[in-house]
Image (cartoon, helix red, strand yellow):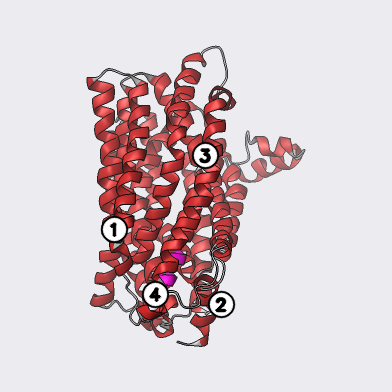
Amino acid sequence: MTDTSTDQSDQFTRGSIVRPLLVLAGPLTATQLLQVAYNLTDTFWVGRLGAGAVSALSFSWPLIFLLISVGAGMTNAGTILISQNVGAGNDDRLGHVAGQTIAFVGLLSIGVAALGAAFAPQLLQAIGAPAGTTVHDLAVAYTRVIVLGMPFTFGFYVFMALLRGWGDTKTPMYLMALSVGLNVALDPFLVLGFAGNPLFGWVGLGGLQDALFTATGFTGFGVTGAAAATVFSRAVAAVVGLWLLFGGRVGLRLGLDDLLLQFETVAKIVRLGGPGAVDQSTESVAAIVTTALVATVGTDAVAAYGIGNRFVSLVWLPTVAMGMSVETVVGQNLGSGRRDRARRTVYVAVAILATAFLVAGAFTVRLARPIVEVFIAGPDAGPIISHGAAFLRIVAPTWVVMAAYHMMNGAFYGSGSTRMAMGIGVTSLWGVRALAAVLLVLVAGLGASGAWYAIALSNVTAAIAGAIFFFRGDWLGDVLAVDSTPEATDDADAGTTD
């Protein structure tokens, strides 16, 4: 084992378990928040174009999320292979694994971009955007620009995944901040141009606005401008990330020869990443199905579902971040042969998150109606607020068990047991959610509450299924590092768990 991987692995395989989890999770939470800023910025400036433009983005995002989930799932393979090879001290494998992941996901992104751009009109119509309308045309334009920029999006996701496996979540956070900053700066000008752009008035530069418009006549690109700003900002982050990797400036070092695809490694990437892509794609499909079922109740219920999901997404960011942290810590410990410490990592993470969400869930149930009222107001908001409050009161009590599920799921991914994670997610979580929603909404006639109960039920069934497979321990044997530390080191130098 060389000094490079020894020093890096020691941070996660020895001593306190709490510290490395929090060190990783802090920047990951910030990165997730910055990712939310992308959508909020686009929505804010596109909102200045009218309701039709906002509706176009609403139709585009489910399709874009579905396509991105393919690449995001595949990048999990990079995290798994890097973390376990770091734990095993296989420095000679790190550059190869990183290069192979970049090259394969890069080729995949080109295929996804081509298919997405070609079939965007048909796919958006299938989601519900009425063909031949302005909304459909705007959605197609926005989607095509975003989709054609998928190689940059996938490239940045690969960079984040590889660095996460290495144990560095701060550098991706800094790059995400740079990318979001560029998007925030470009959006108002690319969307609205110089004429009628309120930004100049807000900062007291109305004279400059008139001069710029007179000189250029630029009126902006509308929703396409928002897409272009996003693609450009992600491209900058991807290019800088690759520069850091190939220059060996972030611990990992790789060369151009590492990009020459080798069948054995690509097959492993597909075997590990494929289930994650299916899992995340199924999540987006389940969301579309649930939305369609809620729509049968009425537009007020759909609005409430959207508000509830936005709130849950914000509250849930620390759980997503901690799950990714568990993935890295478990991967490095299994790579070094410390199976008992890998298991204890999950216990510690569950204790932290369960405590936090026991409190958060109780407060949410208590303050459900005021929380929804923050997102919407007006004389016609009453039904939406009622539906939204019911959503939070029914779903929030299950956050505790769902947090435990996500920590166990992180362990499954960190060990390379991605097919197990996919099976639980597709059946016990998304499958149960879709089936229960159909039965409770359409058959039992419970209306929107039927969909809320379906979500709560699926959270519980997923946690139960995850716990069964976690305690069986099969995931502990799925170690992928080439030269794992002998199992005799299971508890050697394990350190404390405080």
> Of circles 2 and 4, which is in front?
4
Q: Amino acid at mark 2?
A: Arg
Reading the image, the residue beneath label 3 is: 358
Sequence order check: which comes first, mark 3 or mark 1?
3
Question: Can I make out residue 117 in this image?
Answer: no
Q: For mark 1, give the secondary structure.
A: helix
Q: Which mark is residue 472?
A: 1
Instruction: Give the main secondary structure, helix, strand or loop, of the magenta stretch.
Output: helix
Frontmost residue, 126 versus 297: 297
**Which residue is drawn at the image coordinates 56% and 50% (left, top)?**
34
Q: Is residue 231 left or right of residue 174?
A: left
Horizontal side, residue 343 vs residue 424: left or right: right
- Label 3, label 4: how far apart the Cα atoms are: 33 Å
Q: Nearer the viewer, mark 2 or mark 1?
A: 1
Note whether 74 is above or below 320 in the view shown. Answer: below
Q: Which residues are magenta?
A: 328-336
Q: Position of residue 428 (x, y in %)?
A: 28, 43
Q: Which mark is residue 249?
A: 2
At mark 4, the secondary structure is helix
Q: Earlier in the sequence, mark 3 or mark 2?
A: 2
Alpha carbons under labels 4 and 1: distance apart: 20 Å
